[in-house]
Amino acid sequence: MILRQFVSNSPFLLVNAPLIAGGVLIPAGYAGRLHIQELAVPGDALFGWCTGQLPLCAVMATVLITASAWLMNAIFNRYEFYSAAVFAPSLLCTTALVAGSLPALNLPALLAFLLVLISLHRLLGVHRQPVVLRTCFESAFFAGLAALTYPPAMGTLAGLVMALALARSFNWREFAMLVLGYSVPFVYWLVFKFWFRETDRMYLFVKSHDRKALAAQMFSAESIWFMASLLAVLLMALPRYYFPGERLTNRSHNTRRVFMAMALTYALAVPASVVLQGAWSASPAVLMFAVVAAAWFSNYRFSLLAPFVFYAWLGIMAWLTWRQWQVGG
């Protein structure tokens, strides 16, 4: 069984991330079946060198998705989302990001996804630490980088504040460090623009007014199936996330609360992208889905439904990937 293998302690299973991402996206790039989503955000400047080169974009997407999947798996195991080391998070994260990238590959959004994971990794380390000013600054700094790279993710500042309030007693210095760390990337960006006299290009996003294209992307069969499958699995997995059927440590309770605060505010980037940019990007929703679903699937021995849902979801993702190849061709 695939599920049984990924719930075992077998680190070599992490190879699934580059194999799945590279095995789908790189051939799609060479075949011209990738659709690059350019939204005129600051993060686009980082990938200008590969604009118009679909194979290079596919390679960059493979690297970002692989790094995100590995980091998510490390966070899941280190901070006790489950009582033993498992590798289901990397599989779920990779599969969802790849299926979501084929119809509209957004490299800044994928980079922001990785930066939010780095921020979350730093934030989860504040539990029962005597001094966390540096940790708060670093966590907020990476979240600020994510928001600068992909502006719809600006809600992560609220997530940081809520997560810190849930994790620790109030200390105004720690919250001040969050605001300071979050602001630093934007300050440097503004200085850069003024120094190189690029004030005419000093914008965070440009809204597209092509409503027909937006509606076609949002309400396509592929997008509806993708988001519906994520939402359905998430709703079934949430009870197990909060009531896993095993005794949780204080650290595990804290981890789950902090993660949910951050993941909820990051998921708001999906509707924010529609409102602010007139564009559709589903990758921010993958963070909450992959961790919550992995926590449920890892407890598959206590649920008759979990294995069936796992294989059904993988089947839907495989079908969506094949269908998007057909549409792209």
Image (cartoon, helix red, strand yellow):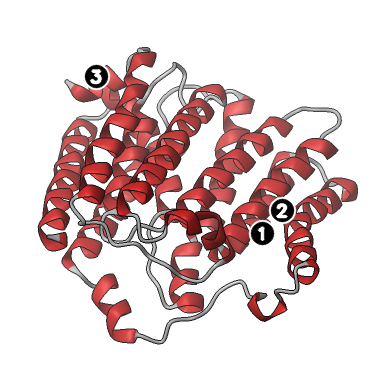
Q: Position of residue 90 (x, y in %)?
A: 38, 31
Which label number is shown at residue 158?
Answer: 1
Residue drawn at the location 78% of the way across and 55% of the way down: 184
Specify the amino acid type for callout 3. Answer: Arg
Q: Residue 272 vs residue 171: left or right?
A: left
Q: Residue furthest top?
A: 9
Q: Earlier in the sequence, mark 2 or mark 3?
A: 3
Specify the amino acid type for callout 1. Answer: Ala
Q: Around disc 1, counting alpha carbons within 10 Å, would you say few (fewer than 14), some (14 to 19), or many (20 or more)?
A: some
Residue drawn at the location 73% of the way across and 69% of the way down: 193
Q: Earlier in the sequence, mark 3 or mark 1?
A: 3
Specify the amino acid type for callout 2. Answer: Val
Residue drawn at the location 24% of the way across and 52% of the way down: 229
Which label number is shown at residue 4?
Answer: 3
Whether residue 314 appears in this view of the structure is yes
Q: Residue 200 vs residue 259: left or right?
A: right
Q: Position of residue 128 (x, y in %)?
A: 76, 27
SS state under label 3: helix
Residue drawn at the location 33% of the way across and 23% of the way down: 15
Give the camera-side residue of 135 and 149.
149
SS state under label 2: helix
Quadrant for residue 151, please give it: bottom right
Q: Position of residue 168 (x, y in %)?
A: 76, 40
Q: Please say if 6 is above or below 296.
A: above
Distance from disc 2 to disc 1, alpha carbons, whole Å, reads 5 Å
